[in-house]
Image: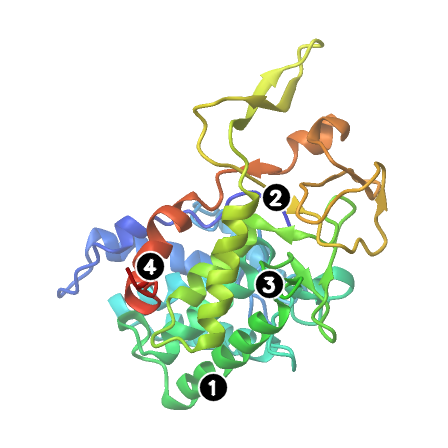
Amino acid sequence: MTSKPIAVRTSVAVLALVVLVSGCTDVDAELVRVGENMLLYHRDLGGWPKNIDMARPLSDAEKDQLRAEKGRNDATLDNGATHSQLRHLAKAYTATKQERFKAAFLKGLDYILTAQQPNGGWPQSKGGTHYAALITFNDGAMIGAMTVLRDVAEAKPDYAFVDEARRQQAAEAVQRGIDCILACQIVIDGQPTVWCQQHDPKTFEPCGARGFEPPALCSAESVGIVEFLMQIDEPGPEIIDAIQGAVSWYEQVKILGKQRVWTTAADGEPDDVIIDNPDAPPQWARFYYCGVLGGWTLAVDGPAINQPIFADGAGLVYDNMAAISRERRTGYSWLGPYANDLLDRSYPAWQAKWAPPEETAP
């Protein structure tokens, strides 16, 4: 679980240019080349490992090594793995009709379907232990899986080849996932807010992971959850309440006049600091105190509910980023303009369609 970008670098803009004509276009050739790499990285369990540039050309020796590693138990949904490969393979099969891409896609789809927990959530990895077994929203793991399943269930063009039985399974899995999302939403003083990066698979309570990831109201991951919920047609009142509660929370806790920037410390090493900047767009801390800390320890008095918190690798929680080690300051995304597009663009369009404000009497 890191804040690094997804390693599969195939351009969505380029893939969107695929044209189905006789023969193989240059775009089709790239789809095939990268798809063949993905087949080599495909684990026998059905999923893919993470943090690998699968678009990189491979030598014959590397290909032989990957064939020998297919039995490794490192398939995951973390950092974009598995659901990203499935999107590419669906495009590759739709463009070329090469059966090996379809077979790999269906095997990966089955991995996602069987990885779903009885509670409706997805862990970081199927059969994972410790925090990898928790309901995982971090790095878009659960939302990434549900997005593929939703597109399969709706028979979107790239997924039209999927059989009816799997489409039905996907639709049912998405609904269970939505129920899990609603169960996990953190409610404070009767008001729905946002989500933690991980939640307990039995109680749905917020959970921490690594030493610098305490239980918290998590602004970055929750944006993707809200965006997913806003894509539901004809949302019921529970979906509308969940979305509006989250948006209200974002408005309540946004940070004005601050910005996170890279700088050079007195010893010449890079550092990450928060500075005053009245022209900066609204920012959000990665973590806000939710009232519980589990095994983490407060190193300061307080904090209050909804106050930004920052954690060091030793499990100590502070109320400012400057208090944690430089290694942790520079190694994680602690503050950012995470929700601006949601508040400025996505939510107003959704609200106008599904939940317009009630007119008040003059």
Q: Earlier in the sequence, mark 4 or mark 2?
A: 4
Q: Which of label 3 and label 4 is nearer to you?
A: 3
Q: Which residue is mark 2?
A: 286
Q: Residue 270's x, y, as percent?
A: 63, 19
Cα separation, mark 4 vs mark 2, equals 38 Å
Residue lying at 33% horizontally and 59% vertically, measured from the top left: 32
Residue 216 drawn at (x, y percent): 69, 52
Q: Earlier in the sequence, mark 1 or mark 3?
A: 1
Q: Is residue 9 above or below residue 125?
A: above
Counting residues from the start of the chain, the first of labels 3 and 4 encountered is 4
Q: Quadrant of the C terminus?
A: bottom left
Q: Amino acid at mark 3?
A: Gln
Label 4 secondary element:
helix
Q: CA distance from mark 2 to mark 3?
A: 20 Å
Q: Which residue is mark 4?
A: 32
Q: Which residue is mark 3?
A: 191
Q: Which of the labelled discs sits on residue 156, or is there none?
A: none
Helix, strand or loop at mark 1 = helix
Which comes before the other along the chain, label 1 or label 4?
4
